[in-house]
Image (cartoon, rainbow, N blue to C red):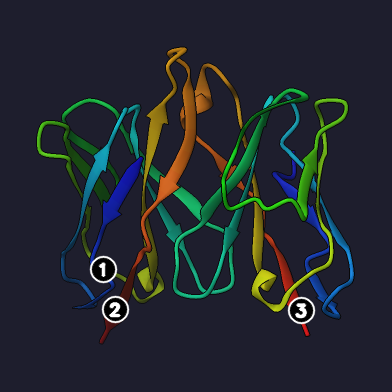
Amino acid sequence: GQNIDQPTEMTATEGAIVQINCTYQTSGFNGLFWYQQHAGEAPTFLSYNVLDGLEEKGRFSSFLSRSKGYSYLLLKELQMKDSASYLCAVRDRVNTGTASKLTFGTGTRLQVTL
Amino acid sequence: DTGVSQNPRHKITKRGQNVTFRCDPISEHNRLYWYRQTLGQGPEFLTYFQNEAQLEKSRLLSDRFSAERPKGSFSTLEIQRTEQGDSAMYLCASSLAKGDGNTIYFGEGSWLTVV
């Protein structure tokens, strides 16, 4: 089974940097995903990590430590439009070796203020 | 390519009625997923298909729920004898099994309200 934890809410100031943490416990691991979801809209893909380390993509970076069951999403130069929920999701691996479904955390609601 | 398409986008139904949602995945995507999301929660996995085969089904999916993907393209999710607890957003997503299968793309969701 999967267990994914992330903070419920965070607040940060426009222009600042914010780090959203995610810890997970899984019986099989085949990647960790971050999605952004604005209220009433579908999740949109932000990043994917399967190996340890940092993946950078513009203002967004994601880090993974498989041994610690830990990831974070780093958002730089925050903008008001970054106010959204950020979902951490883990993909497990079935015993056939193929990748399987995503299991999501409850999401972190980020409020960016002036 | 217009992405993953779902309809209807909104459905209000009376308790006890049946409802059906349709999902058209991104063309060439052979994997199709159904999720359910309630307010303040992350999406919960319901089921997924690879081509027309239903590979996994969550225990959340009671006997009142059934999903099909008859020709390996579009999919339908039917809920029979709806209950108020079924009120949620039903999300469909698709991906490739290989290559860019690392990215799972979501549709805009179908909102269900059971009154």
Q: Residues within 10 Å of mark 1 (few under 14, many from 20)?
A: some
Callout 3: chain? B
**How far apart in space, not on screen, are marks 2 and 1 (Cα)?**
7 Å
Q: Nearer the viewer, mark 2 or mark 1?
A: 2
Q: Which residue is mark 1?
A: A78
Tell me if label 2 and label 1 are in contact, CB under 8 Å.
yes
Relative vertical location of residue B110 with respect to residue B27 in this rendering, above or below: below
Q: Position of residue A99 (x, y in %)?
A: 46, 23
Which numbered marker is on residue B114?
A: 3
Q: Secondary structure at mark 2?
A: strand
Along the line of sight, which residue is nearer the eye, B5 or B36?
B36
Q: What secondary structure is marked by label 3?
A: strand
Amino acid on which disc 2 is placed: Val
Write down the residue under mark 2: A112
Q: Chain of mark 1?
A: A
Q: Position of residue A70 (x, y in %)?
A: 16, 44
- Mark 1 vs mark 3, CA separation in Å: 38 Å
